[in-house]
Image (cartoon, rainbow, N blue to C red):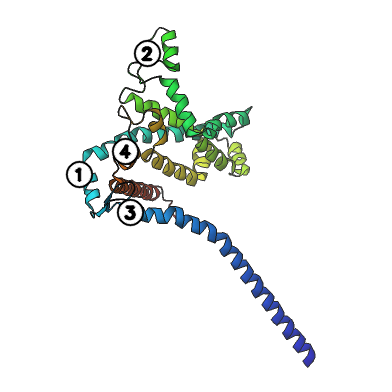
Amino acid sequence: MARSGTRASNSGTHTGKKLSGQYVNKMVTVILFLLIPTVLLFVFTYIPAFNMFKYSLEERDQFGATVKFVGLQNYKTIFTTPEYFSTFKNSLYYLVGSFVQLALALFLATILCSKIRASNFFKGVLFFPYMINTVAVAVIFRRFFQRGDGVTNTDGTLNSIITLFGGESVKFLSTEGLVNVCLVFVSIWRYIGFDLVMFIGAIQSVSPDIYEAADLDGANRWQVFKYIIAPSIRPIILLQMILAVKGAISVYEIPYIVTGGKFGSSTFVIQTTETAFKFQKVGLASAMAVVLTIIIIVVTVIQKLAFKEEK
């Protein structure tokens, strides 16, 4: 009996050591997998963000040859100079366009998730623009709307069609206000595919049994969308709205490539870039970037509170 008890004790100790060793190996594996992305995150995100805040408190050129600590003077310059915030009015165009984009993507996703012919073909067609490089999209639509400087030469694909039917050429990219509408159209065409895929994935994740029950109860398409689809994909809608507002505030590539920020199409990010690299005021540009980051965070928090689900 003593030998049997000793064997059982040794067996239990051996099992305990084995489980302990497996736990340690598992923890080491987890730590190693998390270590690399964490290091990359710190190197390429947190450290640059800290340096950006540090630069915003200084007066410096783009090479850091002359550095002078000025405290909050750069922030004072931003908030006391109307020209820096005047470009935010152009964000309203993109903000309205982003909500039009979301509504259109949700509408198309709902249709494509129903039983229609060639739905996969239309999904591919609508998602294809998102796969094209933004620079290529901007160049294509630059030539589509007009060629040349837009003042002495307004030829372009769209104007060629207009004149073919007896109309007059329109200065699409050199008329203040109209240029932003054209750029918003390009943005919608470019990014609607991403929203569409997200909404389709969310809609298809809803259990088919719910749709069958609604069909048996005689619910129409609008009732299915209102009481089943919309509540079920609410988190995805909120996520896309947050991304849409962020994109509207920080839009850069399309207006910069198509117009270079001319004719009233400049955005806050374009102005920040020009302040840093054209006028070589890196400290002021860093302060502008910090202000933009804070605005995006505040808007995101407000959105999450506004759409917070009741428990």
Query: Marks 2 and 3, Cα distance to the nearest angstrom?
Result: 47 Å
Q: Mark 3 or mark 4, which is nearer to you?
A: 4
Q: Amino acid at mark 4?
A: Lys
Sequence-first tag of 2 and 1: 1
Query: Marks 2 and 4, Cα distance to the nearest angstrom?
Result: 34 Å
* Labels 2 and 3 touching (C-beta < 8 A): no
- 10 Å crowding of disc 3: few (<14), some (14-19), many (20+): some
Query: Marks 1 and 4, Cα distance to the nearest angstrom?
Result: 21 Å
Q: Amino acid at mark 3?
A: Phe
- According to the picture, the residue beneath numbered tag 3 turns out to be 53
Position in image of residue 193 (x %, y %): 52, 34
- 10 Å crowding of disc 1: few (<14), some (14-19), many (20+): few
Residue 277 visible to the viewer: yes
- 10 Å crowding of disc 4: few (<14), some (14-19), many (20+): few
In the rendered image of this protein, does residue 74 appear above or below residue 200? below
Position in image of residue 309 (x %, y %): 43, 51
Query: Marks 2 and 1, Cα distance to the nearest angstrom?
Result: 41 Å
